Image (tube, helix red, strand yellow):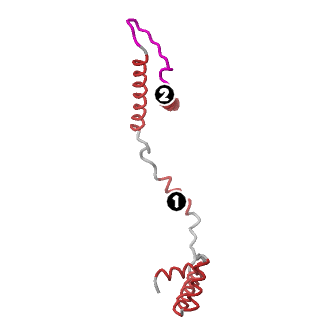
């Protein structure tokens, strides 16, 4: 008997076969004595396993011991490197400054005297506005985080 057929018999004994597989197995058991003998040996093995093997329960203090070991292991360093966060913040600051400088330089002409006129309607691209909005929010969140850390230290 092939290994796939034996696996199918185990599925049948465990009740995991679909209707067509059950019919096919019953037909094979009725017609072939090898199948009948194999089914009887699988059923006997299943009864032996069910009657002689039982699951062991962990001790009552198992969960407490596990939690104690977890608490003893402390994290030596934070998950996120501080330089990565600072690098990302620097990228956003440089991006905002460069975008603002570009908009000021190309947004209005500067005659002899210094006149600063910034007209946002010249920059109607939703992409630029969305990008600037996201950068401003990121800077505000960074400032909030930095100020909260300073307040905790006092």
Q: Give coordinates of residue 51: x percent, y percent.
A: 59, 82
Q: Give coordinates of residue 103: x percent, y percent.
A: 43, 21
Tag 1's secondary structure?
Answer: helix
Return the residue nearer the eye: 72 or 112.
112
Horizontal side, residue 10 vs residue 80: left or right: right
Dot placed on the residue nearer the N-terminal end, 1 or 2: 1
Above or below 28: residue 84: above
Q: Give coordinates of residue 28: x percent, y percent.
A: 55, 88
What residue did someone put label 2 on?
125
Determine the image quadrant of residue 16. Answer: bottom right
Q: Magenta stretch containing residue 121, yes or no?
A: yes
Q: Magenta stretch containing residue 24, yes or no?
A: no
Q: Is residue 154 visible?
A: no
Who's the residue at 57% across and 63% down the image? 61
Who's the residue at 53% across and 80% down the image? 8
Who's the residue at 50% across and 55% down the image? 70
Question: What's the mark number on residue 129?
Answer: none
User: From which residue to which does the magenta span run?
Assistant: 109-124
What residue did someone put label 1 on?
66
Tag 2's secondary structure?
Answer: loop
Q: Nearer the viewer, mark 1 or mark 2?
A: 2
Q: CA distance from mark 1 to mark 2?
A: 57 Å
Q: Is residue 133 visible?
A: yes
């Amino acid at each position: 008997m092939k290994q796939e057929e034996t696996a199918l018999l185990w599925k049948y004994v465990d009740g995991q076969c679909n209707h067509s597989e059950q019919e096919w197995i019953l037909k094979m058991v009725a017609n072939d004595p090898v199948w009948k003998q194999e089914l009887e040996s699988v059923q006997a093995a299943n009864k032996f396993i069910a009657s002689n093997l039982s699951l062991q329960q962990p001790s009552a203090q198992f969960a407490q011991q596990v939690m104690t070991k977890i608490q003893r292991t402390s994290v030596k360093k934070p998950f996120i490197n501080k330089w990565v966060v600072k690098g990302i913040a620097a990228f956003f600051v440089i991006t905002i400054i460069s975008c603002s400088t570009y908009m000021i330089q190309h947004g209005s002409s500067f005659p002899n005297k210094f006149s600063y006129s910034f007209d946002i309607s010249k920059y109607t691209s939703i992409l630029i506005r969305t990008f600037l909005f996201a950068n401003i929010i990121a800077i505000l969140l960074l400032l909030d985080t930095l100020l909260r850390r300073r307040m905790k230290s006092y």
